[in-house]
Structures are given as structure tokens and as C-alpha cells.
Image: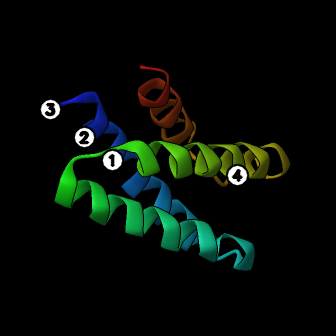
């Protein structure tokens, strides 16, 4: 499994977290991530996935600051790890 594949899976987990939190503002991030995951699955080009994965990471970090118990730190750690490689 490549690093991009692992990042794809981490983004999929982030989508589940966003959906669970049910925050109106994050519906655009969810739809963009879903599109980028589908695109990556089709052509294996991770450019958009990394772009919106980073946006999702920043949103999750900001939300976790205000609500520390609502987001598992493993989700954030995985996104950071695969984004930095």
C-alpha cells in the first residue's frame, strides 16, 4: 500500500468524523473529499486529495481545540503523518 493510498484511507476516516459531528460548515469539505477520493481511485493522482486533506486536517485541529473530547487524536495523527511523507 502506497503512502497516497494510506492518506486516502485517512481522508475517508476524516469524512466519517465530519459526518458524525454534523457541522453545517463542513459539508463542503466532505463533498470535496469524497470527490477527490473517487478521482484518486480512478486515476491514482493524489494532488487534489492532498490539497483537501490538508484543509480537512486544519478543520479537525481547529474543532479539536474547542472540543477536545469529540475527535480522536489518531485521526489527526494519521492525516499529519501521511501528509508529511
Instruction: State the residue at coordinates (72%, 80%).
Output: 24
Answer with left or right where residue 9 lies relative to residue 34.
left
How many marks are shown on the rendered structure?
4
Q: In the image, is residue 24 above or below residue 3?
A: below
Q: Which residue is mark 1?
A: 8
Residue 5, labelled with which disc? 2
Q: Which of the marked residues, 3 or 4, is nearer the chain's N terminus?
A: 3
Query: Local crowd at mark 3 within 10 Å, few (<14), some, or many (≥20)?
Result: few
Q: Is residue 39 above or below residue 22?
A: above
Q: CA distance from mark 2 to mark 3?
A: 6 Å
Q: Where residue 56 sits in the image (x, y, percent)?
A: 60, 52
Q: As drawn, is 51 to the left or to the right of 65?
A: left
View extreme (left): residue: 1
Residue name at image x 66 percent, y 70 percent: 26
Expressed as whole percent of the image width and height from the top left, the position of residue 35 reads: 39, 69
Q: Mark 1 and 3 residues: CB-CB less than 8 Å, in contact?
A: no
Residue at which label 4 appears = 59
Would you call the spot at circle 2 few (<14 residues within 10 Å), some (14-19), or many (20 or more)?
some
* Residue to which mark 3 is pinned: 1
Q: How is the image coloured?
A: rainbow
Q: Is residue 16 above or below residue 48?
A: below
Marks 2/1 in contact by CB < 8 Å: the verdict is: yes
Q: Is residue 18 left or right of residue 49?
A: right
Q: Secondary structure at mark 4?
A: helix
Q: Earlier in the sequence, mark 1 or mark 3?
A: 3
Q: Which mark is residue 67?
A: none
Q: CA distance from mark 2 to mark 1?
A: 5 Å
Marks 2 & 3, CB-CB < 8 Å contact: yes
| Residue 44, x across and y down, in percent | 21, 47
Amino acid at each position: 500500500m502506497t503512502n497516497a493510498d494510506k492518506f486516502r484511507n485517512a481522508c475517508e476516516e476524516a469524512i466519517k468524523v465530519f459526518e458524525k459531528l454534523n457541522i453545517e460548515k463542513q459539508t463542503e469539505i466532505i463533498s470535496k473529499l469524497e470527490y477527490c477520493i473517487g478521482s484518486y481511485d480512478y486515476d491514482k493522482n493524489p494532488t487534489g486529495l492532498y490539497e483537501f486533506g490538508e484543509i480537512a486536517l486544519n478543520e479537525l485541529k481547529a474543532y479539536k481545540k474547542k472540543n477536545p473530547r469529540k475527535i480522536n487524536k489518531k485521526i489527526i495523527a494519521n492525516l499529519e503523518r501521511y501528509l508529511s511523507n
